[in-house]
């Protein structure tokens, strides 16, 4: 599926889709049935952009981005993750957390690509888009 991406002036834009399976719960009565532990196949689309490629001709290696997210979350209970010690793993907080993780990774690359957007789909009928107010300079 194609998601709308923000307009930008970068020369290159890359999109990566990935899936992982995980369990979570939102431990509050207001979350209704989602207060009980249950699982999803999460779908992520992330948009990364930049003006400079590395010596392989990559903005960033697609498989490195997938590995970063898979190793952190695949077949885990998201509530156990240190990034969710203060707030539950909702679609919104997951999208922002994935954005933060990807940005921390990209910031270490010499060609300095930036993440423009993360789409996080939790169910066939529910998804969230996270976009920062400003991109990293
Ligand atoms: N704003 C949010 N609302 C809800 C979240 C969330 O992350 N952000 N999460 C949940 C539950 O975790 C649930 O797994 C997803 O909810 P929902 O879309 O209601 O799931 P259904 O499959 O039952 O949706 P239907 O369209 O009614 O089939 C709840 N709310
Ligand atoms: Zn859920």
Image (tube, rainbow, N blue to C red):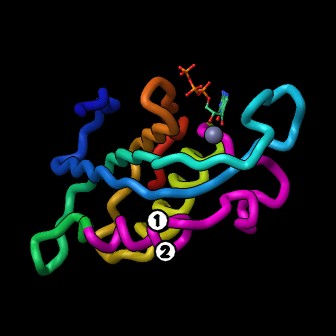
Examine the rendered structure and indicate whether residue 82 appears above or below residue 122. Answer: below
Secondary structure of the residue carrying numbered label 1:
helix
Q: Nearer the viewer, residue 68 or 47?
A: 68
Q: Nearer the viewer, residue 12 or 94?
A: 94
Q: CA distance from mark 2 to mark 1?
A: 6 Å
Q: Is residue 4 magenta?
A: no
Kindly indicate the quadrant of the structure image that contains residue 110. bottom left
Residue 81 in picture, x, y percent from top left? 71, 66
Residue 78 in picture, x, y percent from top left? 66, 59
Kindly identify the residue that appears in the image at 53 percent across and 63 percent down: 101
Q: Which residues are magenta?
A: 63-91
Kindly identify the residue that appears in the image at 24 percent across and 33 percent down: 1
- Mark 2 surroundings within 10 Å by alpha-carbon count, few (fewer than 14), some (14 through 19), many (20 or more): few
Residue picked out by circle 1? 69
Task: Verify CB contact (< 8 Å) between mark 2 and mark 1.
Answer: yes
Q: Magenta residues: mostly which secondary structure?
A: helix
- Label drawn at residue 132: none
Residue picked out by circle 2? 71
């Amino acid at each position: 599926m194609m998601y709308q991406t923000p307009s930008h002036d970068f020369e290159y834009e890359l999109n990566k889709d990935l899936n992982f399976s995980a369990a979570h719960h939102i431990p509050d009565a207001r979350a209704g049935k989602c207060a009980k532990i249950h699982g999803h196949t999460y779908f992520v689309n992330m948009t990364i952009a930049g003006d400079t490629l590395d010596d392989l001709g990559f903005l960033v290696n697609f498989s490195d981005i997938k590995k970063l997210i898979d190793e952190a979350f695949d077949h885990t209970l998201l509530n156990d993750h240190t990034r969710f010690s203060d707030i539950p793993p909702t679609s919104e907080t997951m999208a922002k957390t994935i954005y933060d993780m990807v940005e921390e990774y990209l910031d270490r690359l010499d060609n300095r690509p930036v993440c423009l957007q993360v789409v996080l789909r939790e169910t066939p009928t529910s998804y969230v888009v996270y976009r920062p107010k400003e991109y990293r300079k």
